[in-house]
Image: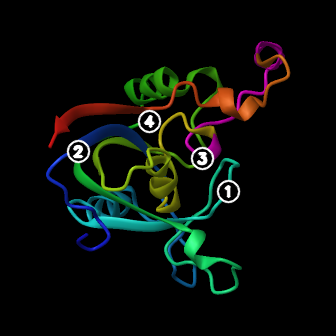
């Protein structure tokens, strides 16, 4: 083991691509003015080729809780799973507000229910998963303020509350169906 990542001469290396929401966060200044889109994109790109580390709270329920450090007041700190990933590339950014093509992209991505509050752009990220928890991509990126497009549970979509949708759920938990258009795909598989 090296830095929490297993090195092995056999195994599978998985890469993923996903589309993330760019949502300007409140700055830590006294005024609380929103950050600029350029600042948020720079913040996302700062993660490129560095290891993003979070700990996953032990839970069977979604959305799961991802934190940078295990809280001191938990009963069993060892049960929190270490999650590691690396963003290997961030594409050019596409705006989803402000003009007809951008609004068209927004409708194509989120449909009639609209984009999440505050989302002004999207960017494609290439991800290298360093620990074997695929769900961590959703949680870790959301924890850093970049939820995946279409991900209702982590803030990347608006829940569908129409009566037709509820009828299609037929008693199942609606939030599990809301993410059926999640912008995440597995890319090349490499056998080591």
Which residue occupies 51% across, 23% down? 107
The quarter of the picture where the N terminus appears is bottom left
Q: Are marks 4 and 2 in contact (CB under 8 Å)?
A: no
Q: Which residue is mark 1?
A: 59
**Circle nearer the N terminus (4, 2):** 2
Residue 46, percent across and down?
Answer: 27, 65
Q: Nearer the viewer, mark 3 or mark 1?
A: 1
Q: Nearer the viewer, mark 4 or mark 3?
A: 3
* Magenta segment includes 34: no
> Could you give the CA–CA distance between mark 1 and mark 2, rounded to whole angstroms?
27 Å
Crowd tier of the residue under label 4, counting other residues whose Cα lies within 10 Å: few below 14, some 14–19, many 20 or above? many
Q: Are marks 1 and 4 in contact (CB under 8 Å)?
A: no
Question: Magenta residues?
Answer: 153-168
Q: Secondary structure at mark 3?
A: loop
Crowd tier of the residue under label 2, counting other residues whose Cα lies within 10 Å: few below 14, some 14–19, many 20 or above? few
Residue 111: quadrant of the picture: top right
Q: Nearer the viewer, mark 2 or mark 3?
A: 2
Say the numbered circle drawn on residue 96: 4
**Circle nearer the N terminus (1, 2):** 2
**Circle nearer the N terminus (3, 1):** 1
Which residue occupies 56% across, 68% down? 80
Does 67 appear above or below 15? below
> Could you give the CA–CA distance between mark 1 and mark 4, rounded to whole angstroms?
34 Å
Q: Which residue is mark 3?
A: 155
Does 43 appear above or below 105? below
Residue 153: quadrant of the picture: top right
Q: Nearer the viewer, mark 1 or mark 4?
A: 1
Which residue occupies 52% across, 53% down? 139
Q: Nearer the viewer, mark 4 or mark 2?
A: 2
């Amino acid at each position: 083991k090296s830095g929490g990542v297993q090195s092995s001469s056999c195994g599978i290396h998985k890469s993923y691509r996903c589309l993330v929401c760019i949502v300007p966060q409140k700055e830590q200044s006294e005024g609380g003015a929103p950050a600029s889109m350029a600042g948020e994109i720079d913040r996302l790109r700062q993660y490129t080729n560095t290891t993003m580390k979070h700990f996953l709270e032990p839970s069977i329920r979604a959305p799961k809780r991802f934190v940078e450090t295990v809280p001191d007041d938990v009963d069993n700190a060892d049960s929190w799973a270490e999650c590691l990933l690396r963003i290997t590339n961030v594409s050019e950014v596409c705006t989803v507000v402000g003009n007809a093509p951008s609004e068209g992209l927004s409708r194509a991505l989120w449909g009639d229910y609209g984009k999440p509050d505050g989302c002004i752009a999207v960017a494609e990220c290439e991800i290298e998963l360093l620990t074997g928890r695929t769900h961590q991509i959703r949680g870790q990126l959301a924890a850093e303020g970049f939820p995946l497009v279409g991900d209702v549970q982590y803030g990347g979509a608006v829940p569908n509350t129409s009566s037709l949708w509820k009828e299609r759920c037929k008693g199942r938990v609606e939030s599990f169906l809301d993410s059926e258009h999640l912008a995440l795909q597995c890319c090349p598989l490499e056998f080591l």
